[in-house]
Image (cartoon, grey):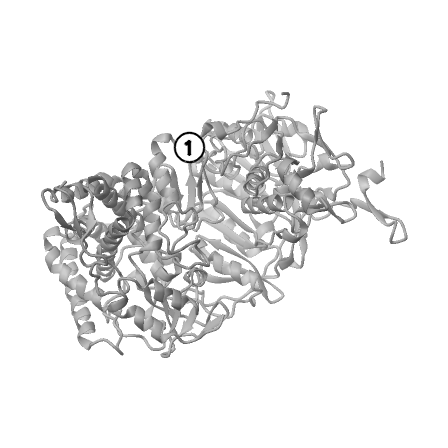
Amino acid sequence: MTTTETPDTLHRILDYSSRADPYPLYAELRRTPVARQEDGSYVISTYRELADILHNPHLSSDVRNMSHPMPSAEGATTPSFINMDPPEHDRLRRIAMRHFGPPHTPGLVTAMEPALTATVGGLIDDFTGKEQIDIVDDLAYPFPVTVICHLLGVPREDEPRFRVWVNGLINAIDYDPRTDPKEKLENGVQARKDLHEYLGGLLAQRHGRPGDDLLSRLANDDGPDGRMTDEEIISTANLLLIAGHETTVNLIANGMLTLLRHPQILERLRGDPDLIVPLVEELLRYEPPVHIIPWRAAYSDVTVADTVIPKGSQIMLMLASGSRDPDRFHDPDRFDPDRRDNQHLGFGSGIHLCFGGPLARREAQIALGELVRRLDRPRLVADPPPYRRSPVLRGPIHLLVEQNGGC
Amino acid sequence: MTSADNLRAFRRGGRIVIVGASLAGLRAAESLRDEGFTGSLTMIGDELGEPYDRPPLSKQVLTGWVPAGGTTLPRRRDIDAEWLLGVPASGLDLATDHVRLADGREVPFDRVLISTGVRARPWFVESEAALDGVFVVRTREHAEGLQRALAAGPSRVLVIGAGFTGSEIASICRERNIPVTVAELAPYPLVGALGAMIGEVAADLQRAHGVDLRCGVKVTRLEGDAQGRFRRAHFDDGSTVDADVAVVALGGIRNTEWLQGSGLAAGVWGVACDTGCRAMDLNGLITDDVFVAGDVARCPNPVYEYRLISLEHWANAVEQAQVAAHNMVHGQADRWPHLSIPRFWSIQFGVNIKSVGVPTFADEVVVTQGSVTDHRFVAAYGYQGRVTAAVTFNNAKWLDHYRQLIETAAPFPPPCATPDQPVDTKPVPVDFPGPTLLAQGATVVVTGHDPGERRVTAAHQHHR
Amino acid sequence: MRVVVDLSRCEGYAQCAFLAPDAFRMHGEEALMYDPDPDDAQRDRVLRAAAACPVQAILVDLLEGRPEERDVPVAAASS
C-alpha cells in the first residue's frame, strides 16, 4: 500500500456540495487507504486500517500530541474524555458510566424504554391532521433532546437557548483555518463558553442535593475512582448533551430517509416489527450519523498498512467510508437489513466507542418503528433533502414527508 | 481420495465420523454441512445429551446463577447427523477404517475427525479422590455437584492448583463469601501459563480478595472422616487445612488412550497433526483421512518456529474445527492452514484476564500500558527480540493490536511509547517454573537402519 | 433460548449488558458473565443485545423456532 496525495478528494468530501452523497468520493479515497495530505496530515478510509488504528495504543485523542495543534472551539476549557487518552480518559469515562450503565447502573436504558415509547408516541400524536411533516423538526430533533435533557437534568424549556450554542459548536467541529472564515471558529469558542457557563450554573444548584439526573449524581457521588471536579463534570455534561442529540437526530432522520428510499423494506418492517433491530445496525453501517473522526494524533510513530505515520501527525478517520469498504462488506452500497456479517464502524471502535450507543440504538429503534407503524403511506417531498452543513455529523436539516390524511 | 471425481462422490455420499461431540465436534459438523457435505455424518460422544459449553461451568454455574444443564450450545445450523452418545470410542482401526465403541460396536467411515478433548486430571490417590466433597470440574455433572456443595455453605473450600480453573473457582468462593484456601506447588498462581511477573499480580489479586493462598506447597494427603467425607488436607510442609470441599484443579488429561495401537502419533501430549489438522502417524507422516481438532490436537504453529502446540482454548477449538471440516471435503490444492494466533480469557476476582499468542514462548516480559497496581494493564512478551504474546488485565480493547505485533514479528520491547506507558517500565525475565509437562519418559522407539525401513513404534506397543 | 458468547472476541464494551441486563452482566469493569439459557421472556432483549455487539461475539441459536431441524440426540448409543 502506497501513500499518495489525494487532497482534492478530501476537499470535495468536506465541501457542502457533496453532502447529499459523499459515498462515490469515499470510494475514490479508499484507493489510497492511508493517504498523506499536502499539509502532512493523514486520512484513513478503509475498513481494516480504520479498525486497526482504533485499537492502536499509539493513536492519541489529545490535541496536545499534535505537532501543529489545530485551533479548536474547545480552546482553553477542560477537554471532555472524548479528547483524552488513558489513563485519564478511562477514569473519567468510568465515573460517568457509573451513572449510565453497567456494571454499576445496568438497568438504566431498559428502564427508560417505556418513557421513550411514550415520548415518541406523543410527538407522533401531534402529526394528526398534518399532511406534511418535517421528520427532523417534528420528531428526530425534539425526541432525543427531551431524552438527554431528562437524563442529564437540564430543563427542557432551556432548549432554545442551548440549541444556539450547540449549533455553534457543531459548526466549528470541522473548522479548517485554510478555507473557513475566522468567525466560524470564534462563534464556536463563544458557544462553548456560553454553554459551559450555563451548565456550570446548573451544576452549582446540584451540589449537596442528591437526585436521579446525571448532573446531580456526578456532583454528589463518590465511587472508587473519586469524584469529578466541577470542570470535569461540566465538560462531560457538555459532551453528553451535544452527542446525546446531535447524533441521534441524524440516525433517526437518515433512517427515515433510507426507509422511504427503500419502500419494500419499509413495507416489510411494517409487517415484521422485529426487523428494526438488524435494520438499525445496517443503518449505522449504511447511513451513519457520524461520518468522520476529524482528528486524532500520532502519539509516537504509528504504522498502518505498511505506512509509518510520524509522531505528531494529525490523522483523520473516515468511519463512514470504512463501513462501505467492499473489501470488508459484501455489496456495501446496498441497504440490506438481513446482512449477517455487519461489524460496522457506526459507533467507532476501541476505548472511545460511543458512550451512549445503547441509548441511541433504542431511540432509533423505537422512533423508526413507531413512525413506520403509524404513518400512512409516507412519501418524500424532496430527494435529496437539504442537509446540515457538517460533513462530520451528517444528516438532513429538514426531512419533509407527506402522508395521507393524518395519523 | 485421489481424483476430483472421488472427492465429489465423497462430498455427495461419503461417510464422516466425528469422535468427540463437544464444541469442536459440533462446530466441525456444522462447517461440514456449510461446506456442502451431504453424506452421512455420525457424532460419537461419551456424555449423554447435546453438546454443551464448558467455560460457564467454572463461572456462572458455580455462582449458582445458571443451572449446570443450561449451557447447551446454540446451533449455527442443522447438521442432520446420527448421534451415538453415552458410549466412548475405544479404538480406531485404520486398516479397515472403523471406529470401535466401548460396547463393541464398530462404526465405519471414509474420513474421521478426532475431537475427544481432555478430561480433568483426578486426584492421584483413588480412595482419596472418592471421598465425599472432593471434586474436579470438567463436565456439567461435576459442576452441578460442586455448585450444590458450595450452596450448602461449607466452612472452607480447598482448591488444589492455582491455574486458571483453580483461580476462577477460588474467585467464586470469595464471591459467595466462602472461606477458601488455594494450594499451589509453584511460587505463584498462573505462573505456569503467564510467568512470574503476572503470577505475582495474580497472587496479590487473590490475597486482596481474602483467599488464603499457599504457594510452594504440595498437598500430600486428603483425609476423610468415618463417613467418607473429606475433612482435612495435609501439606508437605507438615501443615494441614480443615475444609469440607476440595477442588482438584490440576489441569487435564488428553483423551488419547483409545488411539493406542491406531498407529497415530497420539500420546499424553495429544494427537499430532499438520496445520491442515490432518493427523500424523507414528512415523511423523501425514495421513489423508484422519483429522484432529480442539483440545486434543497438537498442531504446529509457524509463528512459533513450527513447534507443535496443544491448546485448551475455546477459540482454538472453534477455529480448528472449521479448518479441519474444510480440509475434510477439499483436495490438497484448496486446503486451509490453521494459522491463527492463540487467544485465551479468564474471569476472576472482577478482572478480565486475556491473552494472545503463546506467553510460554518468551524470555522477557514488559508492561507496555496501564498500571499493574490498579490491575489494569497490558504486558507484552518477547522472545529473542520479537513480540510473541501479550496479556491484558481489564484492558482487552488493546489486545488485538498486540496480535498484529505478533503476526508481523514486531520488535520487542515495543520501541514506541503509548500515552499510558508506565515511566519506569523495563523488560524483566519471564521466569517460568521449569519445563511444563512435555515429555514423561520415552514414548516412542525408532527401529530399522535403511531409510526404507526406519519406523517409529509407540513405546507401549514396543514393550508389549 | 440458547446463547453462547465468544469471550475471546469480547472486548468488554458492555453493550449487551445495557440492552439485556438480566441475561448479560458485567463482572467488574470488563468481564462478561452471561446466562447461556435465558428465559424466553427476554428474547427481544437478547436479540437486541446480540445485534448490538461491536465485535459480533454473541451467537443465538439459529435453529430457534425450527425444532424439526434440531436432530435431538438419542438418549444412548444402544439404538
Q: Nearer the viewer, residue A405 or B460?
A: A405
Circle 1: element type: loop
Q: Is residue C78 left or right of residue B405?
A: right
Q: Give residue A243's quadrant in the image.
A: bottom left
Q: A210 or C54: nearer the eye? A: C54
The vertical placement of B47 against A48, above or below, is above
Give the labeled residue for mark 1.
C1
Residue under the image location 63 percent in, 66 percent down: B384
Residue B237 image position (x, y, % from top left)? 63, 42
User: Image height check: is B82 above or below A226?
Assistant: above
Q: Position of residue B7 (x, y in %)?
A: 67, 43
Left or right: C9 in relation to C77: left
Image side of residue A116 versus residue A326, left or right: left
Outermost residue toward the right?
B449
Return the chain for callout 1: C
In this orientation, which residue lies closer to the viewer: A365 or B153? A365
Inspect this view and state whether residue B372 appears.
Answer: no
Q: Quadrant of residue A276?
A: top left
Q: Position of residue B187 (x, y in %)?
A: 59, 50
Residue lying at the far front of the rendered structure: B5
Q: Amino acid at mark 1?
A: Met
> Which quarter of the rendering shows the C terminus of chain A?
top left
- Residue at horizontal 47 percent and vertical 49 percent from the top: C9
Whether A295 is drawn above or below A326: the answer is below
Residue B138 visible to an observer of this rendering: yes
- For residue B114, above or below residue A170: above
Q: Position of residue B188 (x, y in %)?
A: 57, 49
